[in-house]
């Protein structure tokens, strides 16, 4: 059932897809998804060596590396696909679109959950890297070649290295006039220090 939905999703998202048969036979992104779903089923049922064997075969045949432990929802579309890497603890929701060269990876600093969680209806542009165990909210858009290292809210558009939010719900996000949270924290600490110094002076009769 998932595979039929996947084929329909390809036809919906790719204007070059002329038929379901063409997608099933000729689209390496669809082949990668098919192999993943088989490997994931085996992984869940503790046939993990066989699951890894299939995932490595899929990597060789499609150029897409998806760890069988990853959790992927329905109607995923991998457009072109070559060079995509999806880590073991990555999670992807429904109706997501990934272009070539995307990495859902880790930073090497985390244990346990190491890879990102993508919500529903997310587009990740070619060459983008999303690194770390945080969430990318529903309907987010990650621009090509962005490097995302922290959580992304719903309906946001992220661009650049490191990734920065430029739009939320279609409205421009003004970074020039948006307060820097680090500077705000420093200012609060400075105010606290000044308050403590005034109390000490008062206590000492200054």
Image: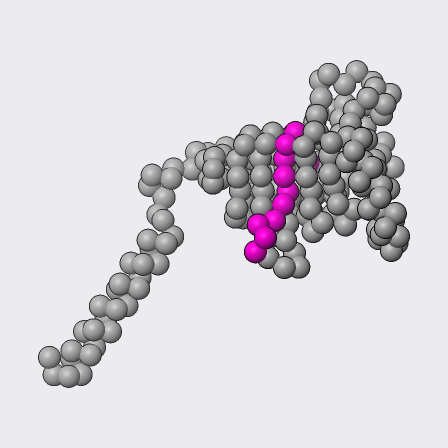
Between 124 and 203, the one nearer to me in the picture? 124
- Any part of residue 150 in sight: yes
- Magenta span of residues: 96-109
Q: Residue at x 57, y 56 (%)?
A: 109
As drawn, 143 above or below 114: above
Q: Say whether residue 18 is left or right of residue 190.
A: right
Between 12 and 44, the one nearer to me in the picture? 44
Q: Residue at x 53, y 42 (%)?
A: 148
- Any part of residue 141 in sight: no
Between 123 and 86, the one nearer to me in the picture? 86
The verdict on residue 84 being magenta is: no
**Which percent across, then down, holds residue 142?**
56, 35
Kindly indicate the quadrant of the structure image that contains residue 143. Answer: top right
**Which percent across, then down, holds residue 13?**
70, 25
Q: Quadrant of the C terminus?
A: bottom left
Q: Quadrant of the N terminus?
A: top right
**Which percent across, then down, holds residue 41?**
86, 47
Q: Residue at x 66, y 59 (%)?
A: 112
């Amino acid at each position: 059932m998932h595979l039929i939905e996947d084929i329909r999703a390809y036809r919906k998202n790719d204007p070059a897809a002329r038929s379901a048969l063409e997608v099933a036979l000729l689209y390496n992104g669809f082949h990668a998804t098919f192999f993943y779903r088989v490997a994931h089923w085996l992984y869940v049922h503790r046939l993990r060596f066989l699951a890894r064997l299939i995932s490595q075969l899929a990597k060789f045949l499609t150029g897409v590396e998806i760890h069988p432990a990853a959790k992927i929802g329905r109607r995923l579309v991998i457009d072109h696909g070559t060079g995509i890497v999806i880590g073991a603890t990555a999670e992807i929701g429904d109706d997501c679109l990934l272009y070539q060269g995307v990495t859902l990876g880790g930073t090497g600093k985390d244990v346990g959950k190491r890879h990102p969680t993508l919500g529903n209806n997310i587009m990740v542009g070619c060459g983008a890297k999303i690194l770390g165990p945080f969430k990318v909210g529903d309907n987010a858009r990650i621009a090509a070649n962005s490097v995302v290292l922290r959580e992304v809210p719903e309906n946001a558009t992220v661009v650049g290295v490191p990734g920065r939010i430029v739009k939320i719900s279609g409205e421009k996000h003004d970074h020039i006039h948006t307060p820097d949270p680090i500077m705000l924290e420093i200012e609060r600490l400075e105010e606290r220090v000044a308050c403590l110094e005034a109390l000490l002076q008062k206590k000492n009769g200054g």
